[in-house]
Image (cartoon, grey):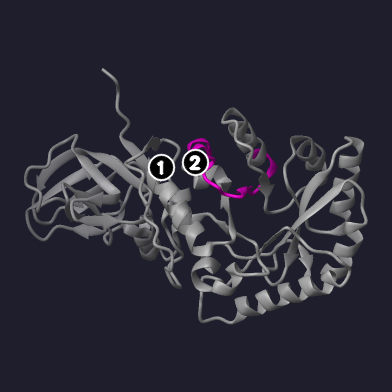
Amino acid sequence: MELKRRVWVEVDLAKLRANYRRIAAAVKPMRVLCVLKANAYGLGVEPYAAALATTDCAGFGVAEPFEALELKKVLSTLNADKPVQILSSILPDEIDPMVEAGVTLPVTDLETAKLISAAAKKRKTTARVHFKLDTGMGRLGILAKDAPRVIRAVKRLPNLDCEGIFSHCPMAYDPSNTFTEDQIDLFKAILADVAKSGITFKAVHIAASDAINNFPRAAKAPFTLVRTGINLHGSFDPNGKRALKVESVLTLKTRVAQVRELPPGTTLGYGRTWCLNKTTRVATISAGYADGLPLALTNRGHVLVKGVACPVIGRISMDYTTVDVSRVPDVAPGDEVVMLGKSGRLQITPDDWGALKGTHAYEIICSLGNRVERLYHVSRDID
């Protein structure tokens, strides 16, 4: 008899593809770069790449070289000719192997560009690069005031295909804040400046998921590309608009470990943060914060048992959580519990957990623990 895992996440790849199609349709004629960094936010880069490689996406974005190499291998096995782009930075000792692998690299300063050029020249190849501009993120890239000068200097270097130029927005989740509009204006001014020297780009992008939803200008000419990560999963930042009609692709489940009738006065969990005021049917479920349940759900959140919302009572432990199942009289050990996803008419989303924790869905999805089994299926090909 096969031993079942106690906690697992089911990822619906049909919904993933449907989310991609909805995003692509919303930004057309822009092309879409699918961001699969951090192992597709912890959900599995290989099945994600396999599901998306058959679409017309412009390629895939990652954060660092090991992710790039892993994704290149996956795409090779799929016979998928899609570019892989590092969206953050590249260190000197990483440049040669990345040029050899054919990864699209970010140019964050003139010195980095010179090293990429030298590596490509040594290998008698051409390295594809995108200029990364800091228009207000304050994290990485060429400062806006230096950008025209640096771009012109890099364009004179040999063995470089200066295919693209991009930036990132720190406030795109807030449609009421004008900072993102200022960034778009600044970016366009830099494009106009270098265009005087005959410099143009095939790939021009500033919009990630938040900007796609909140700032339509970021997905129109002169831009040619958008990037999306969290919206592929069907989630959003807790602030801002939800213009894209995407669905959550994941369902996080566990099983009931024990069910007991506990008398009034019983306290539950570390710190004894919950005291029963009446006889209560309490289930202990086989998942805790090591599996990704936020501690913030303690005495506030709920899970779904047989389509019924069951409150979390007592502090969440590393491996277990106690819930009130008084409204589910027939619950028994081994029964399935939905922690994220749909059960009956009810649904809990990563966005719901993010709101309780005071964070966003990115952190929730990335926090699913290593012992959470990843299962992939295709419900149906959703339009």
Q: Residue at x 84, y 43 (%)?
A: 126
SS at mark 2?
helix
Disc marking residue 234:
none
SS at mark 1?
helix
Q: Name the quadrant containing residue 333.
A: top left
Give the mark nearer the N terminus: 1 vs 2: 1
Amino acid carrying mark 2 in the image: Tyr
Q: Is residue 363 visible?
A: no
Q: Name the residue under label 1.
A: 13
Foreground residue among 276 and 61: 61
Is the C-beta separation of discs 1 and 2 under 8 Å? yes
Q: Between marks 1 and 2, how big is the CA–CA gap? A: 7 Å
Question: Along the horizontal axis of the image, is 18 left or right of 224?
Answer: left
Q: Residues within 10 Å of mark 1 (few under 14, many from 20)?
A: many
Q: Which part of the image, by quadrant, shows the N terminus?
A: top left
Q: Name the residue under label 2.
A: 48
Span of residues in magenta: 45-66
How far across and down, in percent of the image, does residue 278 sit? 7, 58
Residue 63 on the magenta segment: yes
Foreground residue among 344 and 359: 344
Q: In this view, does 35 lie above or below 194?
A: above
How far across and down, in percent of the image, does residue 24 sit? 51, 57
Question: Along the horizontal axis of the image, is 307 left or right of 49?
Answer: left
Q: Is residue 28 above or below residue 98?
A: below
Q: Which residue is drawn at 28% across and 59% down?
A: 301
